[in-house]
Image (cartoon, rainbow, N blue to C red):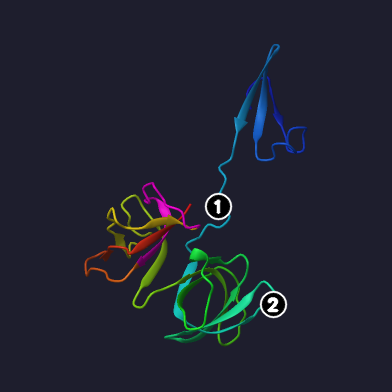
């Protein structure tokens, strides 16, 4: 704490008007200096490294626990997997889920799951996929290398890069969490790919 300063705590006269601003008053004689610290506002949804993808084809959609949720059943190479889709699920491109659609659904492996068969998870992210299209959700470093070093991106000026809400992303996508769509990779270590498109989680 600065000498001669006092902290303004939440609940004070300014907190109701500016709830996201923390500050102190530095009093020097009759002069009052306001020092503002504005915390960085985070995205409402930020993927984490615990997200695990499941790729399959939707063969059933039924009502979930309430009117705003759905149970989506996927037929995968390992059998049937059910996903609960809630208002908190991030559906890329806001696509309506339909029978016969090939999708990748991501669930949080850190959350508890019911011990039932077929397995059932809460979907955190869902995206539709074209035939033979693959997808990876990961943090990519400044060299566009995935966090687990399993994929290296080669981005061209023609690679479509959008934000989650579908807007153009006009900055360098490095050092960010990316949803990468691709079809083929090289046999190098690490494998390299030229993405067909990228979605940036800001």
Label 2 belongs to which residue? 65
Name the residue: 71% across, 12% down. 30
Q: Which of the 4 image quarters holds residue 189?
A: bottom left
Location of residue 36 in the rendering, given as x and y in whole percent from the top left corner:
61, 30
Location of residue 63 in the rendering, given as x and y in whole percent from the top left corner:
65, 80
Picture mark count: 2
| Classed neighbour count for the residue bearing mark 2: other residues with Cα under 10 Å, few (<14), some (14–19), many (≥20) | few
Location of residue 27 in the rendering, given as x and y in whole percent from the top left corner:
68, 18
Please state which of residues 144 and 200 is positioned toward the viewer in this rendering: 200
Stretch in magenta: 165-181
Magenta segment: does it hold 126? no
Q: What secondary structure is the magenta-colored segment mainly?
A: loop
Label 1 belongs to which residue? 43
Q: Is residue 156 above or below residue 183?
A: above
Name the residue: 60% across, 85% down. 116
Name the residue: 73% across, 35% down. 9
Indicate which disc residue 84 carries: none
Seen in the image, is 69 located left or right of residue 148? right
Seen in the image, is 179 located left or right of residue 109? left
Which of the two discs, 2 and 1, labels the residue nearer the N terminus?
1
Q: Secondary structure at mark 1?
A: loop
Please state which of residues 200 and 147 is positioned toward the viewer in this rendering: 200
Q: CA distance from mark 2 to mark 1?
A: 27 Å
Q: Which of the 4 image quarters holds residue 31?
A: top right
Quadrant showing the N terminus? top right
Magenta segment: does it hold 177? yes
Location of residue 53 in the rendering, given as x and y in whole percent from the top left corner:
46, 72
Please state which of residues 7 and 32 is positioned toward the viewer in this rendering: 32
């Amino acid at each position: 704490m600065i000498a001669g300063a006092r902290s303004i705590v939440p609940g004070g006269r300014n907190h109701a008007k500016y709830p996201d601003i923390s500050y102190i008053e530095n009093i020097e004689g009759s002069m009052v200096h306001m020092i503002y610290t504005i915390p960085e506002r985070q995205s409402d949804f930020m993927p984490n490294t615990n997200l695990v993808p499941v790729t399959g084809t939707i063969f059933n959609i039924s009502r979930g626990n309430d009117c705003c949720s759905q149970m989506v059943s996927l037929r995968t190479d390992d059998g049937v997997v059910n996903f609960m889709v809630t208002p908190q699920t991030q559906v890329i491109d806001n696509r309506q889920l339909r029978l016969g659609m090939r999708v990748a659904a991501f669930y949080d492996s850190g959350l508890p799951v019911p011990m039932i068969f077929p397995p059932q998870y809460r979907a955190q992210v869902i995206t539709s996929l074209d035939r033979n299209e693959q997808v990876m959700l990961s943090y990519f470093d400044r060299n566009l290398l995935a966090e687990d070093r399993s994929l290296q991106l080669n981005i061209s000026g023609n690679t479509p890069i959008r934000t989650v809400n579908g807007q153009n992303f006009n900055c360098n996508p490095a050092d960010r969490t990316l949803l990468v769509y691709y079809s083929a990779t090289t046999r190098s270590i690490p494998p390299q790919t030229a993405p067909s498109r990228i979605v940036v989680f800001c």
